[in-house]
Amino acid sequence: MFIQKISNQTDTITTTLIITDGETLVSSGGSFELGFFSPENSNNRYVGMWYKEIPAKTMVWVANREIPLTNKSGVLKVIEPGLLVLLNDTNGVIIWPSNTSRPVKTAVAKLLDLGNLVVKDVNDDDPVNFLWESFNYPTDTLLPGMKLGWNFINDLEFYLSSWKSKEDPSSGDFTYHCDPTGYPQNILKKGSVEQYKTGPWNGLRFSGTPNLGKNDIFKFKLVLKKNKVYYQYGLLNRSVISRFTLSPSGVAERWTWIDQKCQWKVYLTAPTDNCDTYKYCGAYGSCNIANSPVCGCLNRFLQKDPEAWKKADWSNGCVRRNPLNCQTDLFLKYSGIKLPDTRYSWYNERMTLKECKIECLNNCNCTAYTYLDISRGGSGCLIWFGDLIDIKELSAEDKISTLECLRLNPVNLKGRKREILLVSFSLCMGIILLGLSMILYVRKRKKSNQRLRRGGLEHFTDNHHDESHNKDIELPLFDLHTITKATDNFSIENKLGEGGFGPVYKGRLEEGQEVAVKRLSRTSIQGFDEFKNEVICIAKLQHRNLVKLLGCCIQGEEKILIYEYLTNSSLDLILFDPMKSAVFDWPKCFHIINGVARGLMYLHQDSRLRIIHGDLKASNILLDSDMNPKISEFGLARSFGGNETGANTSRVVGTYGYMSPEYAADGVFSIKSDVFSFGVLVLEIVSGKRNRGFSHRDHHHNLLGHAWRLYKEGRSLELVQAYPGVSGNLSEVLRLIHVGLLCVQQCPEDRPNMSLVVLMLGNEGVLPDAKKPGFFTERDLLTTESSTSTNAACSMNEMTITLLDGR
């Protein structure tokens, strides 16, 4: 008799106050809203929760996900003895109930501003006494403050379950758990099959998730107690809106709302590549996506099945060279890896590492041990039993994960005396020969350095053509004292980055001009030839889309280049960062692509020398304060005279992912090699994805193959990143993708030259059909890498780059 419908915005349902289809609850702070909804392309009705102030209606929780309503007759209400229920008002059947733990006299349901729908006593706001809460029953979304794990007192697990599809919120194939077996780690499953594990918690993050490091946005923690185990994250910045989801295709994604672009941006994803596949390389196998093949054995281990290994079947993994004998075993340290699966492990939070070693030595089944917690210099003990699986090599920037000691037979570590003598003799002879070579090299270069110090750079010559092509290169020479003062004695605070050439520092000259100072490292993989090459190639090049070389310093052993300073760093640091890329809109993207194209056209045909850059990639495109692109890094460039357009080399140097197939496989380089790299760059900018390491749930193609498939199926727009302004320029976007695919065609003869590319970018004429791209799939790429590894010195993971990061 006394039941009434909601007439004004409220956050509470009572036994007398209900909501029907079309009415909603709104949390007190206005963050979340709860009501009835239908997924896209569906007429079914569900009770769900979404963000109130975000235009894109984003569901974060669904009540009746398994039993939808087929009409708009639903009613959400509280009934005695304290249950929240969803009724089909047509026949009064309960569609969905909360499983309230105990009865209370006056129960209400309230939507909290954290996104938690709770059932409680009307006068009791203590979370400990809540009768029921939606945070304990997540669907596909983990919000800040929610738990992923177990409450062992009532045997309740909090885990994510994907939607079946965008149209169907019922439980899909994938689930995401915090697994308390052994030492806790998060795990992604498809049905009952384990797909991906994060590695164990190390006090800072899960060891296999370097992106989950310390930052200014989130804080993470693992609660590990007798009665409960759970992972949780919270926000450090209240203005940030973030959620963690499990997609219907089995990808865990952390999303952040970008107000300026009015859209969600992916902050990170897992799994990221094939090396995240659980047990991909078998026992004692280690995966590195930059290698070919990606799987290898840990140091001191051998392939268990070499024949299967040759066929890219690494599931059998690796074995020790000699079996363990327990009493005399020793230990070897492995750094920079994702720690192995901890399903069969034991831990003690109070042990020291020394005590941990003793515990492992006293148990013949112990195979490895390490610190439990590395957050405060190392504490606790974590021990593994049985074979070690699910190991991945981490990037150079993330070397904190360390397996302190893995158990091995002493024979593996000591070797035989004869082998040691042979190795020692070989090393000694190598050192002697290297010393003689260095003496000859130094004498040869000494005269060149003296000439440079006396009269500048006018005596530099290019090995590809005669000296007449290289007359009077006028470049200011700075003395070392000036550069040292400008960089505050090369202080670490002024360091912008480091590449194959050496470190780069920000400096300020006495007249106030800001400069970027690139200093050749004595241990650099590059040397005087690259230094000289960079000077020759760009000393007299003047183009708005090429970085400007201001001068150099050659004094003693120091070789230094001084460039204009560009405030917006390199393109890759913005393009592939979900937060920084918010500054991009479509006009800026097109402006950058067009600028790079004009810079390359100048190098290929308008400069005094015909120059092939040789290492064009996103990290070698620098951006000034107005986002104007400037091509940099000419250490690997080649210059030609007359009508020359290319040559052959036995020394292949560049970056996989951008390198043309004919250059990577046969050492044949030409202006069309740069065109291929430009095409890759275009597709990366359009999609916001890297070519190398790209993965897709439906196939194993790289970014080029993915773009090609979409192009052939007439679905190219699916490739496009949702930049602001892109919807009003769809024809321009499609044209740009088409041009990019023309540039990456397999045969160099099919690719357009850069003058034609610039013409195609600026005109609306009909374009020829694009043919199949080179390096169509990742597997093709890996095969090519393998075939060129004997004579190729290629930069893996972009090691030729110098990162200029504005401060």
Image: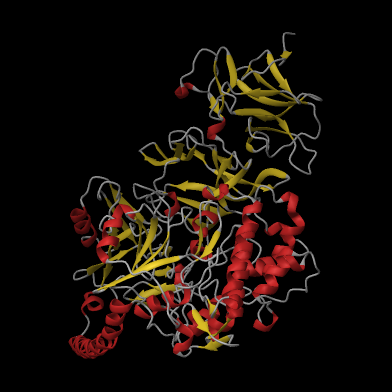
- Quadrant location of residue 687? bottom right
On the question of residue 648 being in view, the answer is: yes
Which residue: 54% across, 88% down? 647
Q: Is residue 42 left or right of residue 189?
A: right
- Quadrant location of residue 369? bottom left
Which residue is more in the foreground, 147 or 291?
Answer: 291
Above or below, comparing residue 74 to residue 149 in the picture: above
The percent coordinates of residue 427 (x first, y second) are 22, 86
Q: Is residue 305 left or right of residue 425?
A: right
The percent coordinates of residue 527 (x first, y second) are 35, 77
Q: Which image quarter holds the N terminus?
A: top right
Which residue is more in the foreground, 15 or 653?
Answer: 653
Above or below, comparing residue 460 to residue 737 in the picture: below
- Quadrant location of residue 256? top right
The percent coordinates of residue 432 (x first, y second) are 20, 89
Which residue is more in the foreground, 580 or 241?
Answer: 580
How many discs mark residues in the rendered view?
0
Q: Colour mode?
A: secondary structure
Q: Is residue 445 left or right of residue 657?
A: left
On the question of residue 701 being in view, the answer is: no
Which residue is more in the foreground, 550 or 323?
Answer: 550
Which residue: 49% across, 63% down? 619
The percent coordinates of residue 381 (x first, y second) are 26, 52
Q: Which residue is the extreme one toward the top?
A: 2
